[in-house]
Image (cartoon, rainbow, N blue to C red):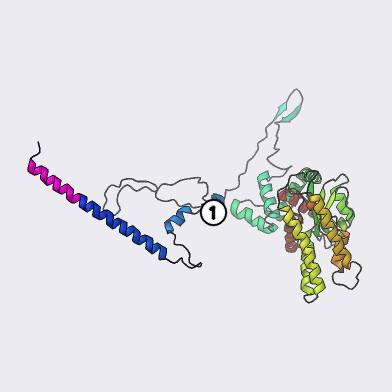
Amino acid sequence: MVSDERYAALHEQYAALQMDYAALREQLAQALQRISDLEAKKTPPASFVKANTSPSTAKRDRKRRAPEQNRARQRETATDTVTHQLSQCPDCGSRLGGVHVGRRRQVVDVPPPAAVVVTEHAVEKGWCSACRKWHEAPLDLSGVVVGQRRLGVRVAALVAHLRTTLRLPIRSIQRYLADLHGVRVSVGEIINLLQQVAAHGAAAVTQIRDQARRRPVVHADETSWREAGHNGYVWLLATPEGERYVERHQSRAGAVANALLGDDFTGVLVTDFYGGYNDTPGGQHQRCWVHLLRDLHALEEAHPAHDETQTWVTQVKAVFAHIQTFRTTPRTTPPPADDPALPLAARLRQDLRALGAQFVQARDHPCRPLAWRLWHFQHELLTCVCDPRVPPDNNAAERAIRPLVIARKISGGTRSARGSQTQMRLYSLAAT
């Protein structure tokens, strides 16, 4: 039982707490009213003032970029791992706890060059007293060596790679084999080895040509190539699928291009505006817009004060801008019967015809050569609109033929017909 004194004390304490509670509620009400009054009188910030954002919140809300967009150098796949262990403190010698891998560092290196491996094949033979003749054990070295040569296929492939892809001189290849692998070969043996590799790959090169002819889109280009001091030309076929086929001919006539494509060619041929491609067999044709734009830019720079020329060039560039905008929209391949490319191509063809007719008869006008080009090739400039597989430029052929241009500038060409054939075959194999 609680005594009367204890009960009275508790009652007084409770009454005091009630008074304090009432006072606190009144103070809270006054504070809230004061805050409301201040908020009502507060002027909004100027429009140029940015709201305060917590750095941590901004960092947390930032969208992470995709891993493939990270430009940092990627780690290589380790072929060996060396663990540097640490079991005690290097300062006081105490035992360490929680030991784990703190960081990693990769060292990329190549193994020492392997010395040449000489495999001697000892072929036994024996005398047959019944047949009265000597017999030798069968020897099949297919896949090990080409023909009757002493150098194996790995050396042959290495020499062809150094000569064709890396464009090393013959004597540099000779020093490379001697210094790194200890293989002693003469200059003539290296040349003969390249010829043997090219001859061995003749069937594969023919297969590359036939496969390129069957592709739906084929790029073609040509460049000069001297042989024994006489001018000639290298003709190229390149496909988006990766085939690269080259031939060297004395002529630059259109008959060479027709023979290169074959009579049964039915794809789309992409070329520049060289006249040798005007009568190619079968299929459709796409002329390179990049060549046209380059000439338009030169025309624009040559006549900066000629308003009529500047306006005409701008209108032609606008046609190409329409083509690029349409090609960036998703489409099906092949296009359906109601493809929107068909009316667009018809409208752009009318624009090109009108732009070409504007100056095609003006003999002394600076726009006449390019106007004639628009008038003559108006259909062949818009194949890329109707077929999304066809690019508007001949960049694939330009890039594919560039290594041969560099090789020609370095070496000046070849010295014989066999040397040209070897060079063309090796390039076809390596580039493909």
Asked whether residue 125 appears in the rendered view, the answer is: yes
Q: Position of residue 70 (x, y in %)?
A: 54, 53
Chief SS of the magenta region: helix
In the image, residue 120 sits, relative to residue 178, either above or below, namely: above
Q: Position of residue 192 (x, y in %)?
A: 74, 51
Task: Residue type at mark 1: give it.
Answer: Asn
Q: Position of residue 165 (x, y in %)?
A: 69, 54
* Crowding near the residue tagged with mark 1, few <14, some 14–19, many ≥20 C-alpha atoms within 10 Å: few
Q: Quadrant of the N terminus?
A: top left
Residue at x 84% of width, y 66% of height: 370
Q: Position of residue 4 (x, y in %)?
A: 8, 41
Read off the residue under disc 1: 70
Residue 13 belongs to the span the image colors magenta: yes
**Magenta residues, as a range?**
1-17
Residue 36 belongs to the span the image colors magenta: no
Asked whether residue 418 appears in the rendered view, the answer is: no
Q: Along the line of sight, which residue is nearer the eye, 73 or 109? A: 73
In the image, residue 183 sits, relative to residue 315, either above or below, namely: above
Q: Secondary structure at mark 1?
A: loop
Which residue sits furthest top? 130
Question: How many marks do you count on the picture?
Answer: 1
- Left or right: 27 in relation to 71: left
- Left or right: 20 in relation to 33: left
Location of residue 355 by image quarter: bottom right
Residue at x 48% of width, y 51% of height: 106
